[in-house]
Amino acid sequence: MKSIRRELWFEVPTRRSFVNITSQVDEALRESGIREGLCLVNAMHITASVFINDDERGLHHDYEQWLERLAPHEPLEQYHHNRTGEDNGDAHLKRQVMGREVVVAVTEGRLDFGPWEQIFYGEFDGGRRKRVLVKIIGE
Amino acid sequence: MKSIRRELWFEVPTRRSFVNITSQVDEALRESGIREGLCLVNAMHITASVFINDDERGLHHDYEQWLERLAPHEPLEQYHHNRTGEDNGDAHLKRQVMGREVVVAVTEGRLDFGPWEQIFYGEFDGGRRKRVLVKIIGE
Amino acid sequence: MKSIRRELWFEVPTRRSFVNITSQVDEALRESGIREGLCLVNAMHITASVFINDDERGLHHDYEQWLERLAPHEPLEQYHHNRTGEDNGDAHLKRQVMGREVVVAVTEGRLDFGPWEQIFYGEFDGGRRKRVLVKIIGE
């Protein structure tokens, strides 16, 4: 069994954003030489997500609006978590809706995707350096 | 390390539906001969889900009502994504709540399930042929 | 390839609660002797979750309030599932938001975590014995 581990680093200047990381995951896979296996991609921070969906600007706008409706950033006082001095209570909730991680099949040396699948880093509390972990195991 | 890859195809006639795919995943596992490992089952389309829950008709009705409340199909204009000519903006949101994939342990050649666990394909934008990927790795 | 399987048992006295299970998963990993691989941790029951987030009491209060707003326990009659004699319709919905499982990378014999990641069992229908499965594969 082979394995590879890579960290992808981000510093999103805005509070919230979606970043397409498919090509970076693909590059880690090519470096690994793994032909058959599983690829885990996860946010290493608990106010961020990794998820798979469409790379379409209108859709990302819709996610932004929808998540803000389900778990609004303000008023800050609505979240007990913010009593710790944080202002990211909403980000911990948004991340649960969008998910922490994806697992992608590796087949014949490629990410085994359907027609529109793309991997995104979802930032809900930006403005600082944060990481995504890529771990691939197989042969 | 052994691995197997199978595609399951669906054409759900209605816009939304839940389909129990446990026996098809089980069949792929038996064909693989894998005794210990991990089994990934994921929707290959970004308006569909794979999830694990109960095979109970009342519950599926509740999911349908609840998802429609969290992310209503209409009015279509509420989603920027629909400006591309699509009418499935809501489906991309519903799929995030229910999830893209499940990973199931394989133990002694069987899907290692709790008492009521069943795997479902969740369709949120039906009426055309769509796929689920089953990838199993192990020994 | 090595693998290990462990069951963690819980009996949460209240209907809902979050339990930090990180040290128990860590213990299973140490017993396994696996250095590089993937660790699956999943609820074996369909009214419970396993998720990764912060071990902060205020945040757990926020999750509790938020989930109760998204999928209220009462009135019981709002859920068709409860016509079966159950009163846990809401728990099946809450579990979908928080998720069934996490997959964690194993690197150099350790759970490969970001700075604040902790694994939780999320109970939404307590008062009886329920299980979490830990399955680790690798070398």
Image: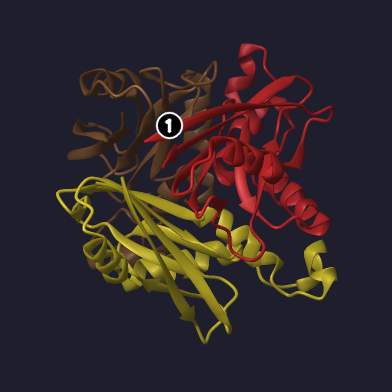
Chain colours: A brown, B red, C yellow
* Residue found 82% across the figure and 76% down from its top: C85
Instruction: From the viewer's perspective, tell me whether residue B70 is left or right of residue A66.
Output: right
Task: Give the x, y percent position of residue B25.
Answer: 63, 40
Comparing C39 with B109, the one in front is B109
Question: Which quadrant of the figure contains the C terminus of chain B?
Answer: top left
Relative height, residue B113 to residue C23 (above, below): above
Task: Give the x, y percent position of residue A78.
Answer: 42, 63
Looking at the image, the residue that sits furthest to the front is B33
Relative height, residue A77 to residue C1 (above, below): below
Looking at the image, the residue that sits furthest to the top is B85
- Secondary structure at badge 1 equals strand
Relative height, residue B34 to residue C123 (above, below): above
Comparing C62 with C54, the one in front is C54
Task: Give the x, y percent position of residue B47.
Answer: 62, 29
Question: Which quadrant of the figure contains the N terminus of chain B?
Answer: top left
Q: Is residue B88 visible?
A: yes
Q: Which residue is mark 1?
A: A104
Comparing C21 with B111, the one in front is B111
Instruction: From the viewer's perspective, tell me whether residue A129 is left or right of residue A48.
Output: left
